Image (spheres, rainbow, N blue to C red):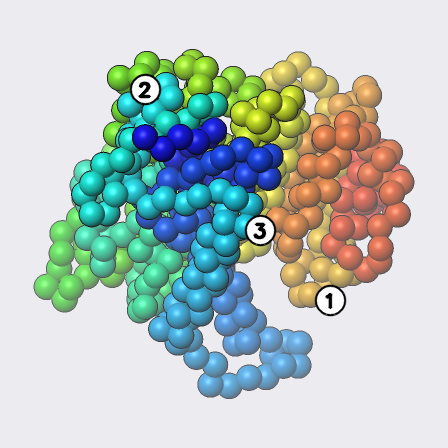
Amino acid sequence: MKTYDAIVIGGGPGGYPCAIRLGQLKQKTLCIEKETPGGICLNWGCIPSKALISAAHHYERAKDSAFMGIKASGVEIDPNALQDWKDGIVKRLTGGVRSLLKMNGAELLAGTATVVSPTEVEVKLADGTVERIQATKGIVLATGSSTIEIPTFKFDGKQVIGAREAVSLREIPKRLLVIGGGVIGLELGMVYQKLGSTLTVVEALPDLLTGIDPECTKVVERRILKRGGAIHKNAKALGYEKQADGSLAVRIDVAGQTQTLVADVVLVAVGMRPSSKGLGLEQVGVTVDARGFIPTDKQGRTNVPTIYAVGDVSGPPLLAHKASKEGEVVAEVIAGHKAEKDWVSIPGAVFTDPEIAVAGLTAEEALAKGLEVTIGKFPFAALGKAMAMAETEGFVKVVADKKTRQVLGVHIVGPEASTMISEGALALEMAAFLEDLASTVHPHPTLGEALMEASAHALGSAIHIANR
C-alpha cells in the first residue's frame, strides 16, 4: 500500500491550493481528482463565465459607442469563435494547475476516491482497478458542490440546461428563460441578453440576489428591464411542454395565478448542493448535516480528527476564494503549523452588469446585532473617472458603527466593483475607521475615490456631493 503524509480528495480551488501548500511545506502529498484539475471554478464556473461576461461587454460596447464618437458597423458575434477562445483559457489554466502541483512536489492521480478508514482511501482508476492508499497525517475532503436539478426541469443538455452547459452554448438562444434570480442565473442570463437573447428571470423569492444589499440589487434589476428583459418575482416554475415549433412553453405560478412563458432555452440556476455523498463518510463516522455539508472547526477538522474538509462541501459561502484560503489553512495545520480560519470577512462579487461586490455587514445586519450605524454613500454619477468610462450607474456605500466610526461593511454596485472591494475587505481586516478611509489619499481620477468620498460622506465631510 502506498503511503503519503496527506491525501487531498478533489482538485478544485480548495483542493489544489491545499495540495500545493502541503508540497511547499515538504509534506508528501497526493491529490485525487476524478475529472479535470481546477474543479468547477476553472472548468465551467468562475473563469469560463467571466470570459463570456468580458466578451459580451466588448460586444455591447462595440455596437453602442456612437455617443462617444465611435461608430462601428457590421459588428457580429461568432459563438463558435467565442467558445474556442474561452476553451483555450480553460485549457491553459487547468494545465497550469497540473504544472503547479508537480512543481511543488504534490502528485496528481485521476480517479474516484472513497474514504474507507480515518487514515485510508480507496481510489477507483479509469481502468476499473482499485488502489488503497494511506495518509499518515490527514485526509482532506475538497469535493466541492454540484448543480441542483429541479424534478420538473430535468437537464437534457440542449434546451433545459444548468450552468455547466450554459457556458458552452455555440448558438445564442433567441429567448432565454432563467429559473433562479441568484448569482449564476443573473450573471449568465445577462451575458446572453447582451449577446441578443430576450431574457426572462423567474425567481421564487421576493427579491433577486437574496442576501445582497437590496439597493445594490435594484440597480442590476433596472438594467435588465432597460434592455427589454422581464422579471417575475414570488414566482414558481411548475413545468414545461415542448411546442410544435421546438420552443418550450413554461408554466409559472405567480401569486396563485398560472402564466405561460415561451422560451427556446431554459437555464436552471437554483443553487448548488455539497458533493458529500458517495465518499464513504458514514462508515468512518464523519458528521454530515441535514443539507449535506460537513461541519468543521476553525482549523478545518471534522469530528474525525484525521479528516478535514474545505470549500463548498464544508459549508457556505460557496466561493472559490474562500475554498482556497481554507485549503491553505488546512495544509498549514497538517504540516504542524499554527493556523486557523480567523478572517473578519469573506468578500463576495457578483459579475452582473453593473457588478456588485460586498464585504462585511449590511446596515440591517448591523442593526440586528444591536449596533447603531452611520452610512456614507457616493454615486458613480458624481465621479469623473466613471463619467469618462461612461459607466455611471451605481454607488459605493460604507456602513460604520455610529459611536466608534469603525467600518462594519462596504457595498458597491458599479464599474469594477469586484476589484474595488479588496480595499473594503482590507479595511475590515485592519479594523479601520471611517477616518482611515477618508483621509487616505486616493489617486485621481480613479474609481477608488468613490470609497474615500463615501467614507467622508459618513463623516459629513464629502467634497463632491452634498453632506447631510
Is the residue 169 above or below the residue 129 in the image?
below
Q: Is residue 345 left or right of residue 60?
A: right
Query: Which residue ends up furthest to the front in the rendered image?
Result: 1
- The picture quadrant where one finds residue 314 is top left
Q: Are marks 2 and 1 in contact (CB under 8 Å)?
A: no
Q: Residues within 10 Å of mark 2 (few under 14, many from 20)?
A: some
Q: Residues within 10 Å of mark 3 (few under 14, many from 20)?
A: many
The Cα atoms of the two marked residues, 2 and 1, are separated by: 61 Å
Which residue is identified by label 2?
Answer: 117
Q: Residue at x 43, y 31 (%)?
A: 4
Which residue is identified by label 3?
Answer: 355
Number of the label disc, if any, that sits on residue 171:
none
Label 3 vs 2, first from the N-terminus: 2
- Indicate the amino acid at tag 1: Ala
Q: Are marks 3 and 2 in contact (CB under 8 Å)?
A: no
Q: Is 140 or 422 nearer to us in this picture?
A: 140
* Residue 228 appears in the figure: no
- The picture quadrant where one finds residue 398 is top right
Q: Residue at x 66, y 50 (%)?
A: 419
Q: Secondary structure at mark 3?
A: strand
Number of the label disc, if any, that sits on residue 388:
1
Q: Are marks 1 and 3 in contact (CB under 8 Å)?
A: no
- Indicate the amino acid at tag 2: Ser
Label 2 vs 1, first from the N-terminus: 2
Is the residue 341 above or below the residue 143 in the image?
above
